Amino acid sequence: QVQLVESGGGLVQTGGSLRLSCVLSGRTISTVTMAWFRQAPGKERESVATITWRDGITHYADHVRGRFTISRDDAENALYLQMNSLKPEDAGVYYCAAVTTFGGRFAFWGQGTQITVSS
């Protein structure tokens, strides 16, 4: 079992920046891949960025590439999402999630943190 707790959400103006954090606890040694997902009102949850825990290989959704940076700190058991040049369409609830088995699904989720971007 892995427990995830996000923080860092809030209200920001268009063009501003935020940094989300996700602290892992529990059986963190089994973490394979982690990701940030976003869920906007009335829409399905979508992947924003992923990172492999061991190698740090990243992948971004097209609409955030170049603006968002996902990173992890293995020693601190933490995942981050640096979000720059925020747009109103970036708003939503952001969740961190973890895969703990190779080829598995995102089985562990945080409680989410709200991002609001004012225009």
Image (tube, rainbow, N blue to C red):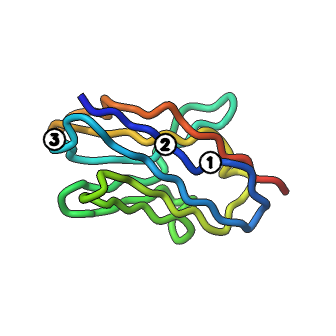
- Image side of residue 100 versus residue 51, left or right: left
Q: Mark 2 = which residue?
A: 6
Are the residues tagged 2 and 1 within 8 Å (C-beta)? yes
Residue at point 33%, 43% (across, down): 24
Residue furthest bottom as drawn: 66
Residue at point 38%, 62% (across, down): 71
Amino acid carrying label 2: it is: Glu
Measuring from the top left, give residue 33's x and y in whole percent: 26, 47
Residue furthest right as drawn: 119
Q: Mark 1 = which residue?
A: 9
Q: Secondary structure at mark 1?
A: loop
Residue at point 44%, 57% (across, down): 80
Residues 38 and 80: in front is 80
Q: Secondary structure at mark 2?
A: strand
Amino acid carrying label 1: it is: Gly
Dot placed on the residue nearer the N-terminal end, 2 or 3: 2
Graded by Cα atoms within 10 Å as few (under 14), some (14 to 19) or many (20 or more), the crowding at tag 3 reads some
Q: Quadrant of the C terminus?
A: bottom right
- Image side of residue 70 versus residue 115, left or right: left
Q: Secondary structure at mark 3?
A: helix
Q: Which mark is residue 30?
A: 3
